[in-house]
Image (cartoon, rainbow, N blue to C red):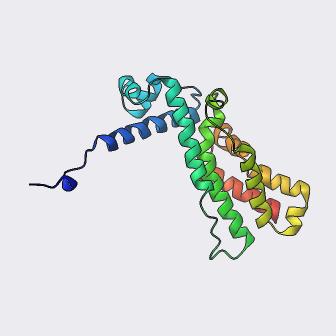
C-alpha cells in the first residue's frame, strides 16, 4: 500500500499554470508586435490553444487584461526588490552596467502595459501606490552610483536618467523595432558616452 505522501502528484495544477502562462505570453507578444488590444481569437491562436480554453482560464477579456497587468507588475517588482549586490564590483561603471541590466528586465516586463491602451483603461482597477516612489528610488540609485561631478551637473544627470527611462526603452523596442539585446546595447553605449 502506497502512503498518501508518495502518491503521484496531480499534474492538473501544473498544466493550468503552464496554460495561463502561455496565454499571458501570447497576449504580451501580440501587444509588443503591434496588436495593441488583441482579441480572444488572436490570443488563442498565438498561444496554440482555443478560445474555449482561454475562457476556461480567464472569465472574460477584462480578467485576462487585469491578470496581464498584475503579472507584469509582479515580475518587475521582483527585479526591483532584488538586493543590489556590489560584491566584486569595483567601479561605478560596473555598478551602472548592473543598473542597466536590471532596468532592461523591468522594462521588458512592463513594456506591453505601456504600449497598449490596456494600462490606461485598467489602471484604476489595479492598485498603483508606488509609481512615484519607484521613480524616486530609481533616481536615488543613480545618484548613489554616479561620481559627484556627473550627479551634480543637473542637465547631465537628467540626460542619463532619461536614457535609462522606460520611455526611451519603448522607443527602442517598439518604434525602432530593436531586439532586447540591441536595445540594451544602445542604452549601454548612450550612458557610456554621456558619462565619459
Q: Nearer the viewer, residue 119 or 149?
A: 119
Q: Residue at x 47, y 23 (%)?
A: 60
Residue 30 left/right relative to 133: left
Residue 75 left/right relative to 115: left
Residue 95 appears in which quarter of the rendering? Answer: bottom right
Viewport quadrant of the C terminus? bottom right
Tell me, yes or no, if residue 179 can be seen here.
no
Give x and y (percent) for residue 68: 53, 36
Give x and y (percent) for residue 35: 57, 28
Viewport quadrant of the N terminus? bottom left
Q: Nearer the viewer, residue 173 or 80?
A: 80
Q: Nearer the viewer, residue 35 or 89?
A: 89
Q: Residue at x 20, y 56 (%)?
A: 6
Q: Residue furthest left?
A: 1
Residue 103 left/right relative to 50: right
Residue 53 appears in which quarter of the rendering? Answer: top left
Tell me, yes or no, if residue 72 can be seen here.
yes
Give x and y (percent) for residue 65: 54, 30
Amino acid at each position: 500500500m502506497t502512503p498518501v505522501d508518495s502518491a503521484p502528484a496531480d499534474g492538473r495544477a501544473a498544466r493550468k499554470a503552464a496554460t495561463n502562462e502561455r496565454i499571458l505570453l501570447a497576449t504580451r507578444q501580440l501587444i509588443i508586435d503591434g496588436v495593441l488590444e488583441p482579441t480572444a481569437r488572436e490570443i488563442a491562436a498565438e498561444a496554440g490553444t482555443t478560445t474555449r480554453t482561454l475562457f476556461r482560464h480567464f472569465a472574460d477579456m477584462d480578467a485576462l487584461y487585469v491578470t496581464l497587468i498584475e503579472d507584469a507588475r509582479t515580475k518587475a517588482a521582483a527585479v526591483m526588490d532584488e538586493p543590489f549586490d556590489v560584491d566584486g564590483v569595483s567601479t561605478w561603471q560596473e555598478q551602472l552596467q548592473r543598473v542597466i541590466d536590471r532596468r532592461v528586465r523591468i522594462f521588458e516586463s512592463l513594456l506591453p502595459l505601456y504600449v497598449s491602451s490596456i494600462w490606461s483603461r485598467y489602471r484604476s482597477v489595479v492598485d498603483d501606490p508606488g509609481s512615484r516612489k519607484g521613480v524616486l528610488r530609481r533616481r536615488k540609485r543613480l545618484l548613489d552610483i554616479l561620481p559627484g561631478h556627473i550627479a551634480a551637473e543637473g542637465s547631465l544627470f537628467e540626460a542619463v536618467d532619461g536614457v535609462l527611462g522606460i520611455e526611451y526603452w519603448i522607443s527602442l523596442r517598439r518604434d525602432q523595432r530593436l531586439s532586447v539585446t540591441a536595445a540594451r546595447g544602445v542604452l549601454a553605449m548612450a550612458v557610456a558616452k554621456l558619462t565619459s
